[in-house]
Amino acid sequence: MPRPSLYTTMVKPHLPLISKWARTMNERQIAEKLGIDKTTLTKYKDKHPELVEAIINGKQDLESDMYSELILSATNRFVEETNNSESMDKTGALTITKTTYKKFVKADIGAIIVVLKQISKANGTEFNNYATDELKQKLAELKIKQQNADKDSW
């Protein structure tokens, strides 16, 4: 009976972990975790589609989670927060009071712009950041004024 391959013993049993690792690690780091060289990992990717799939799935999961967080950051919302406070009563007994309240979180303008750009890109349209366009126009006008001022000073 042939000896099992290094892939079968060192990599294949860890495919679910590899998918998790791919969320935060590059391929060199994944190879180190597996105890193999990066070039060996690359060779295995060429021969074993399930390895490539595990890495892709991990990166896609990360991208999906990040996009969800970005959309959340781009919206006004209320979040529930809990505060625990400790106090002693007259008998010396410790009392813990748990207070839950809702806090308003304002949408992040930068996140809104990124989300709008992504939506525009997905729809095949171009998102215009009007504020940026106005600033660029004012900058161009100032440069022209400065050039004219420089000419006048000669």
Image (spheres, helix red, strand yellow):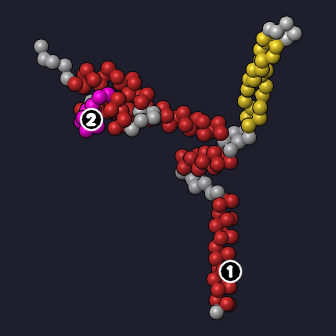
Give the label, 1 or 2, closer to the camera. 2
Q: Is residue 144 above or below residue 37?
A: below
| Label 2 packing within 10 angstroms: few (<14), some (14-19), many (20+) | some
Q: Quadrant of the C terminus?
A: bottom right
Q: Quadrant of the N terminus?
A: top left
- Helix, strand or loop: magenta stretch: helix
Q: Is residue 110 above or below residue 73?
A: below
Could one spot residue 46 in this view of the protein? Answer: no
Q: Amino acid at mark 1?
A: Lys
Looking at the image, the residue that sits furthest to the bottom is 154
Report helix, strand or loop for mark 2: loop
Report helix, strand or loop for mark 1: helix
Q: Amino acid at mark 2?
A: Asp
Residue 61, horizontal then vertical, whole percent: 48, 32
Residue 106, horizontal then vertical, whole percent: 74, 40
Q: Along the horizontal axis of the image, is 63 left or right of 105?
A: left
Q: Along the horizontal axis of the image, is 65 left or right of 93?
A: left
- Tag 1 residue: 145
Circle on res. 37: 2
Q: Along the horizontal axis of the image, is 29 left or right of 47?
A: right
Q: Residue at position x 64%, y 57% from top? A: 129
The magenta segment: 34-46
Q: Nearer the viewer, residue 142 or 123?
A: 142
